[in-house]
């Protein structure tokens, strides 16, 4: 079977309104894809940069797939969270990007967004914390329902990904 090995890291994030951020990430692939080795999801540590604009995580990604076809090519989805001084966690953004199909090293920027919510939810979020979240986080990377959401643009998550492909030509899988 054709193989794809994805190695890299969730480097960090920029452009968010507050510091003290962490990231929950995952890789989603279609039904024709099977994991040989590695983790399909993870979570970074909280980073509180003192004098820098970028929250640095350098969290590793290492996953090895076998596949029968290109349908359902893997994509990375992220959730960025802010931890306040009281230890409360607040969702700051969702995002996803497709893993590049070409072998090699890739620097990827993943833009994020969060649900806008109503005026009363905005006031509650300001004074109490929290805020609107998706009931089904899979909506971030699947389906057209995502385009019906009212959202607010947030920051960017930076990824450094290396893609290694093997036996694609032998099994008739063409990129």
Image: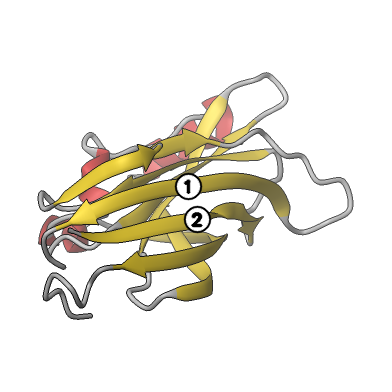
Position of 44 relative to 99 (above/below): above
Coloring applied to the structure? secondary structure
Position of 126 relative to 28 (above/below): above
- Residue 34 in view of the camera: yes
Q: Are marks 2 and 1 in contact (CB under 8 Å)?
A: yes
**How many marks can you see?**
2
In the rendered view, does 142 fall on the left or right side of 22? left
Counting other residues with Cα less than 10 Å from the Cα at mark 2, is it few (<14), some (14-19), or many (20 or more)?
some
Q: Residue at x 50, y 55 (%)?
A: 7
- Residue lying furthest front: 170
Q: Residue 90: image x %, image y %?
A: 52, 33
Q: Quadrant of residue 157?
A: bottom right
- Residue lying furthest right: 51
Q: Residue 38: image x %, image y %?
A: 41, 39
In the rendered view, does 14 fall on the left or right side of 71? right
Q: Residue at x 11, y 53 (%)?
A: 32
Q: Which residue is mark 1?
A: 62
Q: Residue 158: image x %, image y %?
A: 58, 62
Q: Nearer the viewer, residue 35 or 41?
A: 35
* Helix, strand or loop under label 2: strand
Pick whichever of labels 2 and 1 is earlier in the sequence. 2
Question: Marks 2/1: CA distance?
Answer: 4 Å
Q: Which residue is mark 2?
A: 7
Q: Nearer the viewer, residue 135 or 61?
A: 61
- Residue 93 in view of the camera: no
């Amino acid at each position: 079977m054709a193989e794809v090995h994805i190695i890299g890291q969730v480097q960090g994030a920029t452009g968010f309104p507050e510091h003290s951020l962490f990231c929950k990430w995952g890789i989603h692939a279609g039904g024709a894809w099977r994991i040989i080795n590695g983790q399909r999801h993870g979570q970074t540590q909280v980073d509180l940069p003192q004098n820098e604009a970028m929250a640095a995580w350098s969290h590793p990604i290492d996953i090895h797939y076998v596949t029968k076809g290109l349908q359902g090519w893997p994509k990375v989805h992220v959730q960025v969270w802010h931890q306040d001084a009281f230890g409360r966690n607040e969702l700051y953004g969702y995002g996803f990007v497709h893993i590049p199909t070409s072998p090699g090293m890739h620097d990827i920027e993943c833009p994020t967004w969060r649900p806008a919510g109503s005026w009363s939810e905005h006031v509650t979020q300001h004074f109490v914390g929290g805020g609107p979240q998706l009931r089904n986080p899979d909506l971030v990377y699947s389906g057209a329902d995502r385009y019906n959401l009212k959202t607010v643009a947030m920051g960017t998550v930076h990824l450094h990904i290396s893609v290694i492909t093997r036996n694609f030509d032998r099994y008739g899988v063409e990129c």
